[in-house]
Image (cartoon, helix red, strand yellow):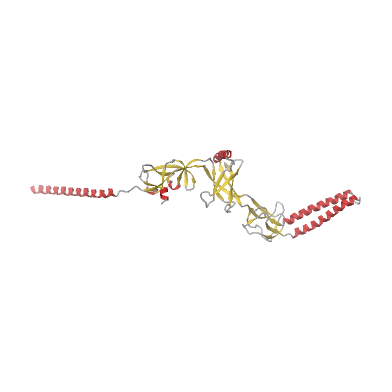
Amino acid sequence: MINTKSKAVSLLAAILVAAAAIAAAITLRSRSSAAPQDHLAMPAPRVTVAPVEVESLSEYDEITGHVDAIETVELRARVSGHLEAVHFQSGQIVHEGDVLFTIDPRWYRATFDLATARAKDAEREAKRASELLAASAISSEEAEGRLARAAEAEADLATARLDLEHTEVRAPITGRIGRALITKGNLISGSPGDASLLATIVSVGQAYVYADIDEATFLRFNRYAQEHASSSGDRIPVALELADETGYPRQGYIESASNRLNPETGSLTLRLVFPDHDGALVPGLFARVRVPISAPRPTVLVNERAVETDQSQKFVLVVGHDRVASYRTVTLGGSVGDKRIVEKGLGLGDDVIVNGLQHVRPGMAVDPEPALALAQR
């Protein structure tokens, strides 16, 4: 009995000693691991910040328009006959007065020669009529008849001359010509109402752009246009970009606006004029147009790289004087170069993170570096 109790006491003592040894080992290990953890604490992430800018800008509306030529001409035959020659290449620039098509002129030249001979004969008879009437050799009725026939012959000669001239189809304007719609050897018609279409020419150098604005935008634009006209009197400037362009590099002006709103679409059409020195504004192209709808006012701008998306809202991370990043939702407007207009959420004096956003969360301490200092390295 005594032996049994002694064994139990010995076993309990051994268990207590082992437990104390394990606890001491764990404590020692935790202390030894805590020291290097404190020693290796992560530094604040380095980020690039840029200040919010405020510039005096107009508010713009961006709309879609289509390009059209200032002048468009359909070349049609004025006389009938076989097409004898085509004097241009498709797509080339032609100048006013250039001969583009030649219609077989033989019939019209013969008609002109005949009309010329008849006109000369009638003119000679009319001159003789005056002498014969003075000598009472003919009656006054006969003299008047000769004068009338001379005038009729002169009119026939003028008609024949026009028909002969119209066998050469000339360019009425300077511009770019399309392809020949009728080729050499074909019979063409010059009859009114059924004249053959030979080709089309569109003017170059400038182009129209037609764009529709909705009713709400029109009301704002109309107020701005009245203020602009009363203050400066200059044309309202607009900007354009094609599908392969960015930043609205083409500058033009508003030439006119429709005098009524379309009740079916609730829109009004603006006609804009743009220079086309490089020939890129081809009639029929679609383009994006930026139209001013307000006078210049102080506008907050932020770098495009600072804007992030959180589900359905836009936000930026603002760094305060305490070097802590804070979450700020923003309401954005249009683009100005590489910057975005901020309608709500930021103000002058705010610094936003533009580089290093992926390493930062709201509430984290950061090591900010101005974007200007980074660019000067």
Q: Position of residue 231 (x, y in %)?
A: 57, 39
| Front one among 186 and 225 | 225
Seen from the viewer's position, the closer of residues 316 and 314 is 316
Judged left or right of residue 112, residue 11 is left
Q: Quadrant of residue 219?
A: top right
Q: Is residue 1 visible?
A: no
Q: Is residue 369 left or right of residue 187?
A: left
Q: Position of residue 176 (x, y in %)?
A: 62, 55
* The residue positioned farthest toward the right in the image shown: 136
The picture quadrant where one finds residue 269 is: top right
Residue at figure coordinates x 8%, y 49% from the top left: 3
Which residue corresponds to the image point at 81% horizontal and 57% vertical from the top-left?
Answer: 117
The foreground one among 212 and 15 is 212
Residue 105: horizontal and vertical position, in percent?
73, 59
Residue 304 % position (x, y):
45, 47
Would residue 132 be visible to someone looking at this image? Answer: yes
In the picture provided, is 286 more to the left or to the right than 158? left
